[in-house]
Image (tube, helix red, strand yellow):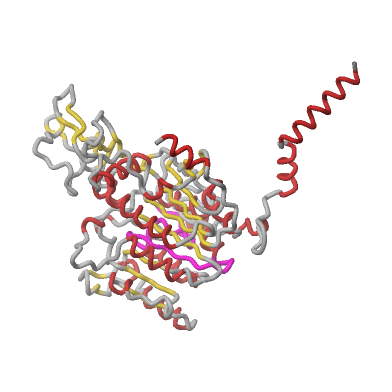
Amino acid sequence: MGQEDLQDSLRVVPNTHIAKNLIIFVGDGMGLSNVMAARVFQGQGEGRPGEDSQLSFEKFPYVALSKTYSVSHQVPDSASTATALFSGTKTNSATIGVSARAKVNDCDSLFGNELTSILDWAQESGEQGHWAGDHHQSDARHPRRPVRPQSPPGVGERLQDAQERHSVQGPGQAAHGRLAGKRSQGDFRRGGGRRQFKPITHMDSVANKTGTRLDGLDLIDYWLKEKKNRNARAKYITTAAELAALNKISVDYVLGLFNHNHMKFEMDKKKDQVEEPSLTDMTRAAINILQKNNKGFFLMVEGGRIDHAHHLNNAKRALSETVSMADAVQAAINMTSSKDTLVVVTADHSHVLTVNGYPKRGNPILGVAGTSNKDNLTYTTLLYTNGPSYHMVNGRRRNLNGTDTGSKNFFQDVLVPLSDETHAGEDVPIYATGPMAHLFRGVVEQSYVAHVMAYAACIGRNKQHCQRIGDRLPLTAASESAASLLTSPVFTLMYQIFIFIILFNRH
């Protein structure tokens, strides 16, 4: 196996072409322990031991680590990491789409500190953009338009309706800002969260619940009217069947909101009556339409429910969602070419999930790792440092005998009781393939991701370094050429001969 891997590595040649298309997958909360556990989970689901399994993106030739801290916090929130990933600038926690000069609880500090994102840069070059995910389409991963500083940071991604975050400018206003923005012409959006787009006077006929907007705006109607006024071919859809029936020839703009709240976890969707599309379905549909643009496209796909499951200490759903996102990544790879499409897979932050004990090879990843020699109680391979699944009775851990730890409704034990499990602060992986993917190496700042993608596609501040027709122009062509000459074997030999002649003449 080692020799085969070595040969594969020796065959890898950096791709320095210009990226026509940019695709980034963000596994929300997909830290390294999550990736390892999901890999085993996938393999065991296929009837194998699991440890030697590979998720689709783990086959990519280039890997780096991303430092996720925010300007203000050692362990970040989702807003600051989204800003770093897509604007190329780190910022304070509890803010999104603005620089670190913007202060929490100070709305006036927003002005003059707004940031642009890679979607803006792509649209300025004529490319189209698309956001797809299984969470609210007004959630923190979309720094499309600046959002005013929020307070308090909180978790904000909880499943319960009663736990909606409250902010100076919250998700609903953020959705309005993105849909009403002057550059909204490239927006394709699919996910959940219909309630954020409808006023409280509107009753959702499917969920039998009202919208949540207090400003009276109906953003879905607004979006449709805005497209109609521009004679643009737009469609609003709410079911998997409508998504499957989309005709790419007759539509250019799509707004898909498939749930009143967050979309269902993949393993909770009824296979016999699927109303919601999978992440793979949404990815395929997005690429199918975006490929019509001969100037290329930018696509962001998020596995948002990985994060939601972790916040509940629900490892099985988190791993299932990770495998689901890996399937979507494979679909994107199958539909594009690595010659002109840069595909990046990363996470915004990690979670406090641990893989512990000394379980034997092939032991169920959701099973029991062993028995404690201190309290004689069993413990599972996967545990969380903190969260709501805290079980202590008279100072003792709960007894797991007879408990189905592999159930989707089993919640792993924790050390510290909290209303929500928290993010973790360790570095997260970046996997890349396609043009300029070799620039992802070593340990980098999270803000580096946007800069590499922009450089690969010759957009944003990297426009001047490339030309659309012909070869890529390096950052400093003259200096790099000189550097390559100085370090070449021929120059080294000539230099040694030159020194020898000088020394010989002195004697």
Magenta region, main secondary structure? loop
Which residue occupies the foreground of this view, 397 or 113?
397
Residue 313 visible in the displayed image: no
- Give, as a single range, the part of the protein colored magenta: 123-152
Residue reaching furthest top?
507
Tell me: residue 288, above or below residue 97: below
Residue 474 visible in the displayed image: yes
Tell me: residue 176, above or below residue 49: below
Q: Is residue 26 magenta?
A: no
Residue at x 64% of width, y 63% of height = 468
Tell me: residue 395, above or below residue 321: above
Residue at x 33% of width, y 66% of height = 196
Q: Is residue 128 magenta?
A: yes
Q: Position of residue 221 (x, y in %)?
A: 37, 78
Which quarter of the rendering shows the N terminus? top left
Which residue occupies the foreground of this view, 502 or 281?
502
Q: Position of residue 121 (x, y in %)?
A: 56, 62
Residue at x 23% of width, y 43% of height = 388
When asked about the image quadrant of residue 331, the answer is bottom left
Position of 342 compared to 48: left or right? right
Residue reaching furthest left?
402
When asked about the image quadrant of residue 68, the answer is top left
Tell me: residue 30, above or below residue 383: below
Q: Position of residue 341 (x, y in %)?
A: 51, 58
